[in-house]
Image: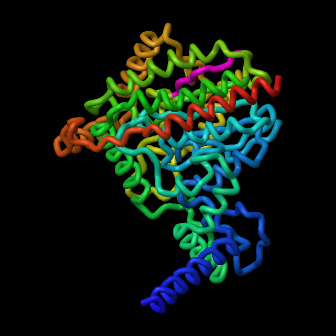
Amino acid sequence: MRAYLRVLIGVFVCFLGFTTFVSVAVDPYDILGGPKIAHFNRDKTRIDEDGRRVTVGQEILTGGHRTLLFGSSRAVEGFPRALDDADWPGGLYNAGIRGGTAFEMARALAVAGRSPDLRCVVVGLDSLGFQTIIKSRATYWISALPDGNAALAAARISLSPHAFYRSLQTLRDNVFGRPPRVRYPDVYKPGEQRARMLDGAQSFLINYQYFFYDPDRLQFMLQALDGLAARGVQVMGVILPRHPWHDEAIYQSAHRADDEAWRGDLARAFQDMSAHRPSAPCVGTEGAALWDFSRFQVTPLPSVPSEQATQPQPHFYETTHFMPDIGTAVLDRIRGKTPQPPFDQPDFGARLTPQNLAEQDEKARERRARWQASDPDVPFILQAYADMLAKVPPANTKDLPRISLSRDDLQTMVRDVQAMRTKVRSLD
């Protein structure tokens, strides 16, 4: 029996050693700084897989960036990956995470607060990230985001079966010369783009049918944001632009009131944070500001692609993800610059405060009415939504799983915020 156990343990240790060696040698996420060898690991074809949690976690700890931009895949796809000093004061790094939840972004913000170089953060916000049914994705736990320790994260990644799998994919891609996967091609198959747009719009409607806003998740993120603002980091919140089909999906869904409640809570929190004094602001002099670019602000748009269309649409990859020309316009607007046409209109982007919530709600209703009166695709999408709603009734909150934030999550955030305040005292 002892011999069998020794053999079993030996096999396990050998297998673990082999997988660790492969993960370290290939380094699929490009975080270990090892050599890059042609036809072996030079092309990191899987670096953006798993939502960028691993690469972003390491970058915000070691990159020394002055401005970080956070958000979900809409931030990843919709903003430039990086800007130099000519386009943003001190430069900017896009730290967006595909599929990023409010919890994950809050942890990324808390980890970012450890950098003495950080001066500004831009946070792309979407109410769907603050729902109750999910907290984090699998690769969050091997990244540096849970504890902000780059060395421990590197060890976790080296031992991770997930990283081993990505290493094998990277190795195969290098050996056979396979390029990275292209999410949005320059040429589509006929009908593919149209199907993507409709599928994305219907999925968004279903998500809002099952959406329940969790104020605890917002408060969790606000702890990190307030800690950054108190440390002297300027905080800019951006309610991200949406395709009008997505804006209409919220109006058609059963939970628009949740979206409005979330928006109001954000406005009040950012007004409170604006009283902090930023040490080296990127925009103006306030400690925090909230901008709203949603609710029918990106109109008019070209008609939905036909069944024969193969060329990409302008401004949006599909109804979920906007292109970097919109993201660049957003950054220009909050800096006080005039965006490039067609986003140079004065009503593109609005500062949101508790005092103007009602006014902005009325302006959103007016923009919706103009869109419904002018866009020839409105009857098409309204009928598609009516057909979908007939199949997907509103969910009852009791029927949905709820994943709450744990006591350890809350205590870790408190410690991180206290560390930020200690850091600002030491900087002073």
Using the image, determine if residue 367 lies above or below residue 154.
above
**How many discs mark residues in the rendered view?**
0
Residue depicted at 53% across the width and 35% down the height? 411
Q: Position of residue 114 (x, y in %)?
A: 71, 38
Using the image, determine if residue 77 lies above or below residue 307.
above
Span of residues in magenta: 286-293
Residue furthest front in the image: 2
Residue depicted at 70% across the width and 79% down the height? 40
* 357 and 70: which is toward the camera: 70
* 336 and 94: which is toward the camera: 94
Q: Is residue 290 magenta?
A: yes
Left or right of 316 on screen, residue 259: left
**Magenta stretch: helix, strand or loop mostly:** strand
Quarter in which the N terminus is drawn = bottom left
* 115 and 51: which is toward the camera: 115
Q: Quadrant location of residue 417?
A: top right
Q: Quadrant location of residue 425?
A: top right
Using the image, determine if residue 224 lies above or below residue 269.
below
Quarter in which the C terminus is drawn = top right
Is any part of residue 224 visible from this angle? yes
Left or right of 106 on screen, residue 256: left
Residue depicted at 36% across the width and 35% down the height? 376
Q: Is residue 234 magenta?
A: no
